[in-house]
Image: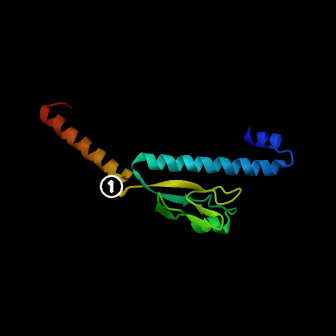
Amino acid sequence: QIEQAIRTQFTEFAKNQSTAISRTELLRYSNRGQLDAFQASGVVEGKQWYTARDDHVCPECEELDGRIISLGSDFFKTSYGSGDQPPLHVRCRCILLPVLEQSKSIDKLDAKVKENEQYIKELESIVGIS
């Protein structure tokens, strides 16, 4: 729908141009939403750049792939400014992944749940509940 709206408003754009614009901008706002959610979560301390990891990844994005930085930091700086999230360029397919605080990582949460389950089982056996 966005692609069609672009072509309707800007008749000089070819279909591939309107597709590139709509996909790039949707990805930009999707990643912005991710970043906002990371910041609001209280458990995310960093962000990781993640590419599609295929033969179409550009050298600039490949260099950023896997890089982890704090939430308030920028991944790149260009002559046009800096960037705290993908996309780096038109047709970029990169996304952000959350980096959890170590003390609140899923492994530690799973361990705590198992600890609590064991504790509950011990209490149940003491009071005679099975």
118 lies above or below 100: above
- Please name the colour scheme applied to the rendered image: rainbow
Say left or right for 82 vs 44: right
Looking at the rendered structure, the secondary structure element under dot 1 is: helix
Among all residues in the image, which is located at the extreme left?
126
Among all residues in the image, which is located at the extreme front?
80
Query: Which percent across, then down, holds residue 31?
Result: 58, 50
Task: Out of 83 and 110, give the one closest to the viewer.
Answer: 83
**Which three-letter amino acid code belongs to the residue tagged 1?**
Ser
Query: Which percent across, then down, holds residue 51?
Result: 60, 59
Task: Out of 67 and 6, give the one closest to the viewer.
Answer: 6
Query: Which percent across, then down, holds residue 32?
Result: 56, 49
Q: Residue at x 37, y 53 (%)?
A: 105
Query: Which percent across, then down, holds residue 49?
Result: 55, 60
Among all residues in the image, which is located at the extreme right?
12
Residue behind mark 1: 103
Residue 79's image quarter?
Answer: bottom right
Q: Quadrant of the C terminus?
A: top left
Q: Residue at x 65, y 61 (%)?
A: 54
Label count reads 1
Q: Residue at x 33, y 48 (%)?
A: 109
Residue 46's image quarter?
Answer: bottom left
Say left or right for 98 vs 128: right
Question: Dot 1, how many residues are within 10 Å of its Cα: few (below 14), some (14-19), or many (20+)?
Answer: few
Q: Residue at x 30, y 50 (%)?
A: 111
72 lies above or below 38: below
Task: Out of 130 and 59, give the one closest to the viewer.
Answer: 59
Q: Quadrant of the N terminus?
A: top right
25 lies above or below 130: below
